[in-house]
Amino acid sequence: KYWKIRKNSPKFCDACIGRGLYSLQIKSWLKEYGQLEFKDKNLIIKSESLRPDPTTKLIDFKPICEFIGIEEIFISDNDVHAPTVHSGPMFNETKVMLRNLFEPFN
């Protein structure tokens, strides 16, 4: 329902849910810049790849470093100082709603 109402809104990508629909944003960029130019100038990585290795506790930035042409760096998860504050577990109804919303785009 939200999608049908908001998808044509000029501020759709500024909306909370709209910002989470990355595939739509990428399609728009590809249309604007073309696939080759886009791939040369942009690096898309999953946030999961920036989690610390469970054994070494290091975050590997190799793909990013290679893309921008700098020496490879590692950051210890001990150096991360922005903890996430959780307000409690997510309601099951919310999980189901979000999975259904994002599933076509994953």
Image: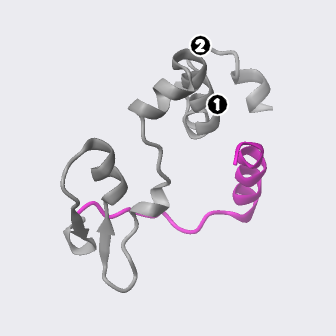
Q: Nearer the viewer, residue 24 or 44?
A: 44
Numbered disc 1: secondary structure = helix
Residue numbers of the magenta segment: 81-106
Q: Residue 76, labelled with which disc?
A: none
Q: Residue at x 51, y 27 (%)?
A: 36
Mark 2 → mark 1, Cα distance in angstroms? 14 Å
Determine if the magenta segment contains residue 32: no
In x, y percent, where is residue 89? 58, 68
Counting every numbered tag in the picture gives 2
Residue identified by numbered label 2? 10
Residue 17: quarter of image: top right
**Mark 2 belongs to which amino acid?**
Pro
Circles 2, 1 touching at the beta carbon (< 8 Å): no
Above or below: residue 101 compared with residue 74:
above
Q: Residue at x 36, y 86 (%)?
A: 55
Q: Nearer the viewer, residue 15 or 42?
A: 42
Residue furthest top as drawn: 10
Above or below: residue 15 compared with residue 65:
above
Q: Earlier in the sequence, mark 2 or mark 1?
A: 2
**Mark 1 belongs to which amino acid?**
Leu
Q: Is residue 43 left or right of residue 74?
A: right
Residue 69: quarter of image: top left
Mark 1 is surrounded, within 10 Å at the Cα level, by few (under 14), some (14 to 19) or many (20 or more) other residues, namely some
Q: Residue at x 33, y 45 (%)?
A: 67
Above or below: residue 13 compared with residue 58:
above
Q: Is residue 15 left or right of residue 68?
A: right
Determine if the magenta segment contains residue 102: yes
In x, y percent, where is residue 76? 23, 72
Residue identified by numbered label 1? 24
Task: Please state which of the two labelled residues, at mark 2 or mark 1, is closer to the viewer.
Answer: 1
